[in-house]
Image (cartoon, coloured by chain):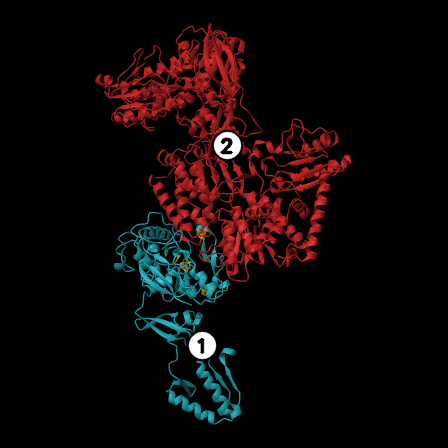
Amino acid sequence: MNFGDGETMNFEERRKQAIVEWDALQKSPKPRILVGAATCGLAAGTEQVITAIKNELARLNLDALVTRVGCIGLCYAEPIVDIIKPGRPRITYSKVTPEIAIQLIRDYLVNDNPHPDLAMGTQGEGGIEGIPKFWELPLLKAQIRVSLRNCGHIDPESINQYIANGGYKGLENALKMTQEQVIDFTKKSGLKGRGGAGFPTGQKWEFCYKATGKDKYLICNADEGDPGAFMDRSLLESDPHSVLEGMLIGAYAIGTQHGYVYCRAEYPLAIHRLQIALKQMKEYGLLGDNILGTNLCFDIKIKEGAGAFVCGEETALMQSIEGKRGMPRPRPPFPANSGLWGKPSNINNVETWANVSVIFDKGADWFASFGTQSSKGTKNFSMAGKVVRTGLIEVPMGISLGDIIYEIGGGIVGGKQFKAVLTGGPSGGCLPASLLDLPVDYESLNQAGTIMGSGGMVVADEDTCMVDMARFFLTFTQDESCGKCVPCRVGTKQMLEILERITQGEGVPDDIRRLEKLCNTIRSTALCGLGQTAPNPVLTTLRYFREEYEEHINKKYCRAGVCSKIVKSPCQNACPAGIDVPRYIRFTQQGKYGEAVAVIREKVPFPAVLGYVCVHFCEAKCRRGQLDEAIGIKELKRFAADHDTGIWKQNNKIAPPTGKKVAVIGSGPAGLTAGFYLAKKGHKVTVFEALPVSGGMMRVGIPRYRLPDEIIDREIKEIENVGVEIKLNSKVESVDDLFKQGFNAVFIGIGAHRGLNMGIDGENSLGVVDGAEFLRRVSLGEKMKVGEKVVVVGGGNVAIDASRTALRLGAKEVTIVYRRTRAEMPASAEEVEAALEENIKIEFLTNPTKAISEKGKLKVEFVRQALGKVDQSGRPRPVPIKGSEFTREYDMLIKAIGQESETPAGFGVKTARAGRIEANEDSMITSREGVYAGGDVVSGPASVIEAIADGRKAAVAIDKYLGGNGAIEEILASVEVPPKYVPPEIEGEQKRLSLKMVPVRERLSNFKLAELGWDDKQAGYDCSRCLRCDLEAH
Amino acid sequence: MADINLTIDGKQVQAKPGMTVLDAAKLAGVYVPTLCFHPDLAPYGACRLCIVEIEKMRGLPTACTTPVTEGMVVKTNTPQIQQFRRGVLELILTEHPHPCLTCWRRERCGPFDVCLRNVDVTHRCVLCPKNGICELQQVVDHIGIEQVEFPYVYREIAIDRENPFFERDYNLCIVCGRCVRVCQEIRGVGAIALTYRGSNALPGTAFGRALLDSDCQYCGACVDACPTGALIERNRKWEGAGERKVLTTCVYCGVGCQLNLTIKNGKIIESVPARENDVNRGQACVKGRFAIADVVHSPERLTKPLIKKNGKFEEASWDEALNLVASKLGSYKKEEVGIVASARCTNEENYVTQKFTRVVFGHNNVDHCARL
Ligand code: SF4
Ligand code: SF4
Ligand code: SF4
Ligand code: SF4
Ligand code: FES
């Protein structure tokens, strides 16, 4: 194509001028301040920051250039302010308040203190001590900026800054090619449409290019409607010219004269900046007739959409431009032949156009060098949800989901468990942790049941109910369906109704089949993409989280504690045994401690034990915790139990003898609980215990300074009082024998008492002991010799218990080594705290490799670990660092990395790895009729409360098996008329009281209780913090 | 242009370019169930009942919207199609009362019989004016639905009886959009449109105002387009199917709209504009559509000429009347005569009238009531 001389010169001059201006700006002797002023920044308070900066500059009489730039993507860190002092690298500051801004001006601009404490990173050449390199930060290292290349760097309202950074070079390059060459070049780059469907862009252009007809239309789809998606908005607000330049190239390739940007009216700033950009383009001869002196004639209009989600669908969008109701129409005919006003039309989305302009500047090969074989280039995502760093990111195709969420996103907020990630918005699907390795490309996501979509990414944590999430998205599509075709209009409504019923606890088993049928019908018969993909959130949750549907339907249980109709209170919901927490808290507050214990006893026979040692699942979910700190639910349990009046016995009922006999093997919490409820149902229960003491792990696992003997004795006594007979020193090897002795049913609760091997050389050297065995022998009264220096390997509660016990046995120096970091440690936080207080050292990222016993000393070699990729458990995998080995000497090494069960072959039940017995999770029945199992022997090492919950389930099943009705629920405390709900007055944060501990010096010489409980005042205070989530606010 | 050859359910068909697969299926004598399709309207594709399988095409295209192409191989009734068609129809029925549709006894029930299944009167097909002529019924009978396993929700919308011509009962609406499209595409009026989105979508006027306050011309095109009992002419509401049809020309004006009169018990019960002609192609105005039967059967209608004798009108024969007029006309001077013609006469009659005036009386004193 020929350039008309005059015009080209003109633009060339302009480009030269733009570059001169830009260079001058870079070398400016004045300091420059860049402020992120896209919507994310403005919402976070950028305006106030700018005002503060300007005022302060004026006050100090300083001359500095303040520029509003777009969004660099770190929306969570807005307002972001960059300061560039002449001769210094650019420093990025995050979460800048007006006060911080003023401080920075005074300290950095005036006094040259760059404030590393407030800085995020430096950009450009050189560095500043104490401040990392911005692009080396974990959240940016994995990112590649292609379409977002200028975002946050240039003033979006300055065409010259765009030009100086390579802008409109792509257009010039394209104009030197023929139309076919431009199309081939685009094909070569491998660019696919970024709007969701991923159709190859070059091919799409070709269709429209080849279509007959003179008038053709070109459209930029900026109708971004997915909940939580803001990629296009940011791009338009931060670099509108990159999109418009792409459109010019497309217009040339296809041969169109008319362009539209269809942008939702909810994006006023984006529209404003587009308008400015269009005006500048006209001025520069980049719009209108004979663009850059060629015979390319093209104009662009902005059409504001009224916010209907369906108008993101191309045919609906075109109807909307025509002024009609935005409803899709069937294809064929395809828009390439008959689109807007019935003319050949081509439509691509914002991100695609922004990629086009840079592809023609930097080359198709350059672009194709990013990404994977079939998905080239990069993709923008807006990350939202329960991830630490939300914001806009641009990553190469093929990066794994795990890298996006953990490396870039910084993992889950509050250290919670990752549950699912939803891509593709309401048209996409939820992927579980097992797919964190999945590469993000079109094919992989499709295979997994979701879609790339336009780039919305919502991360869900353990507190998200997947059924509720599916329901939410269905509400959205149901509302946003245009209402034209039957499957989408009616089908999504029927689906929503079913989902609503399920979340309200009114689901029936057939619902899942019905949902699947609806999904199928809608997917295959809906008119447009909106309807066809609407079932995806349901299909994927059914595929990956089916158990949650089944729990809602069959057990009326929502594990995330979200579905309010079936969750009385989050704490009760989280308790494996379902203790009615708010009710006993109310009784405690009223001083009715006996009633409080009775409430607890409605679900468990061990209120006091739990009060001392429970791992309190409830507190992790306590709603008060979202405000300041969770209620001390466990501590209140201990307080009530310590003040028990025994009132529960008044309502305690024991059924008349049934004549049936039940044998329980093992006197741990699972066995005793099962025995307790079975005895109350009138069965004759005999508990066989191999050890000389009863109580299982409560007695020989948990050290006495946490759980005194009297507490266990008292509660086991009550169990004997209802008729349970405990035979100590009676090891059972064969279940057949028991049946021969006339027992009608057997419950196995033998726990998991044998420590696991570390699998290293010298594992059995002298001085290496097993943690579980160590604790058991100490509990049984053996005086163990530990020497002076002890090392404990492991990160669980057993490791902590063993180390604190070793200290009490006279060790001078105890060290725990753990291969991951504190964040991943499974031990409960307060135990770790207590251990640190007692001066126990914890060395993280360290693992033993061998142990050699030499002259009474134990030489242990360790290797340091680094955290690698996040694995499917959502935790980073530790990887040994080669060459970091080192050796230390100890007197004793305690291995506490897990335990297994020793299930005798004579039990004749099916077992899995580590000696665990396979049992049905609802009835606890084993592979053998009449034989049930529960507790650690089924689950592996777990907690007292989980063992109790197993015992209850087994008691129900065994009673039914023996001809009973299986009803073990009871009311032991008076049923209160729930007081009217008055929301407690909450003024600011009211944290939980810290626990009184026996001073460390006094603790270490003995095994006396280390934690002192609350007194009535303290307990009352904590009760008053409870939000009473079980009462409905009316 | 050359014919397009395609195969539908194994049958060879020659279709014309621009035809849809549905048109071609009709040519081949293959029935494909439809509800939102209307021959006078642009392809729409909303009810999804006409889904078919077409080799080399993704998904299940709708026959009513897909243009024919050379060599197409179409299957209209595979097990997969049957399954999904039934699935979609089931969904349609969750928006439309259907106890009678799935009841084997429907054909035997009269409107006043006792329902054995205790179905609410509002939900009974046998009580619907469209019973027997309802397209939904036909489709259900063809596809066959024994049971709808999703709950049906009655919309509980008050029936609109504001105008004297037709009633709007949107509790029966299946949102096929035919009324809306005919009003917009053919009448060019747009008095009604689809309102709201998602499951709330329904035809209606702007801001839910009365039809009277909209641009409605009461042409009744929507009523004729409606496949269900949602839009019903009030006068013929309880008349049922009728006995025969008579094709006639509308008497109201000179356009000559063709009307199909439905006759029952020797009386006109409705007049529906005929489609197969070049004059009005299925359309009429409010008079031709709604004001034929009333006028024809009115006791006050004049069927013979009247002559005033002694201050009173008396019936007379045409000969008497014409002779009287001729004799009187002769008694005036030419310029004393003016002639007013009727808009209800045909063009030919009006032509003769003006010719008569100009030739016989030699002046232009002729006018026409439609000008008043
Ligand atoms: S699938 Fe939904 S949005 Fe698409 S045309 Fe049908 S009703 Fe409208
Ligand atoms: S605030 Fe009270 S009722 Fe709510 S979760 Fe916490 S302890 Fe339970
Ligand atoms: S009567 Fe005619 S003008 Fe009125 S709504 Fe129906 S089609 Fe439209
Ligand atoms: S009123 Fe009749 S024609 Fe109009 S959408 Fe409803 S069913 Fe269709
Ligand atoms: S008749 Fe084809 S979709 Fe309704």
Q: Chain of mark 1?
A: B
The answer to whether A412 appears left or right of B131 in the picture is: right
Query: In the depicted view, which residue is nearer to us: B331 or A270?
Result: A270
Q: Position of residue A327 (x, y in %)?
A: 48, 55
Colour-to-chain, red: A
Of the numbered discs in the image, which one, if any, rests on residue B228?
Answer: none
Residue A747, how many percent across, how many down? 30, 21
Chain in cyan? B
Question: Is residue A223 visible to us here?
Answer: yes
Residue at disc 2, secondary structure: loop
Residue A50, placed above or below residue A824: below
In the picture shown, does residue B210 fall above or below A984? below
Specify the subunit that label 2 lies on.
Answer: A
Q: Which mark is residue B253?
A: 1
Say whether residue B205 is left or right of residue A162: left
Q: Amino acid at mark 2?
A: Val
- How much space separates mark 2 and mark 1, taking CA atoms? 76 Å
Of residues B42 and A578, the one drawn nearer to the viewer in this rendering: B42
From the image, tell me which residue sits under label 2.
Answer: A982
Q: Residues within 10 Å of mark 1 (few under 14, many from 20)?
A: some
Q: Quadrant of residue A301?
A: bottom right
